[in-house]
Image: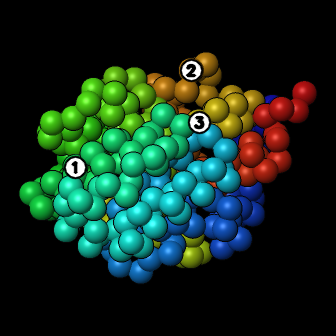
Amino acid sequence: MKLRKEELKEFLDEKAEEYNRPSFIEDDPISIPHRFSGKEDREISGFLTAAISWGRRSMILANAAKMMDLLNNSPYEFIMNAGETDFAGMKGFVHRTFDSADLIYFIKALKHIYSHRGGLEEIFTGYMTEDSLQPAIHELHNIFFELPHSKRTEGHVPDPYKGSAAKRINMFLRWMIRKDNRGVDFGIWNRIPPSILSCPLDVHSGNVARKLGLISRKQNDAKAVAELDGILRIFDPEDPVKYDFALFGLGVAEGFSRES
């Protein structure tokens, strides 16, 4: 699909407008943190949900809801007070390669972050640069694994400095930072400008972006994210990741990338 840049921006603006609305929430992982009103509850439920956001959406939602049940539907209170006896009920939890051992470590790591690092927001605020949150995602990875852990668990917190597109973390950051005034994204982290957010890049959004000529790189990796950032920040310097809704809608809801 070949469009001039002005036409492409107009097309994507229309699609972002179409999908960035409350009806988007119900079948999306963001519906899980929407269950909560407290800032820390939204952060923690959002982070845990984002961590397992790959695979079938129905399974993501079911297993994220199961995680919240295991945390007594009080995520912040649970992680701050949970002991070894509380972890017994988590045995058997699994979402694809993310299992109960991973969940237990995530809870311990989050407790460490909220007890000794000022919380998730503080990490991203402290390590962001003027135009990027990717260095902060890298530092989150380092901080998250300061406690003794299994090497295999590290794969569940991506690191863009190792080439990852960090789709799930970038999605979580969109939820926390972007102020859409539509009741979808929360916009509860006020010290980070939405202008430096990066678009969550996965198979669907990547295929759509290539078909539209937004990116040329074939892999969905950190370099492709940077390439996509470059053009989306021209289209809307203040709110570039609003186009995540457009790419998602075109790819998942409309099957755009599968068309000839």
Position in image of residue 218 (x %, y %): 61, 19
- Give the labeled residue for mark 3: 202
Left/right placement of residue 174 relative to residue 14 reads: left
* Mark 3, secondary structure of its residue: loop
Position in image of residue 124 (x %, y %): 26, 52
Question: Which residue is at the far top?
Answer: 218
Q: In this view, does 233 lie above or below 213?
A: below
Asked where in the image residue 68 lies, by quadrant, the reply is bottom left
- Give the labeled residue for mark 1: 109
Q: Kindly tell me whether residue 235 is visible in this rendering.
A: yes
Asked where in the image residue 190 lies, by quadrant, the reply is bottom left
User: What residue is shown at x 55% (from left), y 27% (from top)?
Assistant: 220
User: What residue is shown at x 79% (from left), y 34% (from top)?
Assistant: 257
Three-letter amino acid code at disc 1? Ala
Q: Earlier in the sequence, mark 3 or mark 2?
A: 3
Q: Which of marks 1 and 2 is nearer the N terminus?
A: 1
Question: Which residue is at the far right?
Answer: 260
Q: In which quarter of the image is the C terminus?
A: top right
Q: Nearer the viewer, mark 1 or mark 2?
A: 1
Q: Classify mark 3: residues with Cα within 10 Å, few (<14), some (14-19) or many (20+).
A: some
Q: Nearer the viewer, mark 3 or mark 1?
A: 1
Q: Quadrant of the N terminus?
A: top right
Q: Which mark is residue 85?
A: none
Three-letter amino acid code at disc 2? Gln
- Give the labeled residue for mark 2: 219
Q: How is the image coloured?
A: rainbow
Q: Classify mark 2: residues with Cα within 10 Å, few (<14), some (14-19) or many (20+).
A: some
User: What residue is shown at x 88% (from left), y 33% (from top)?
Assistant: 259
| Viewer-nearest residue: 105 or 239 | 105
Q: In this view, does 110 lie above or below 146?
A: below
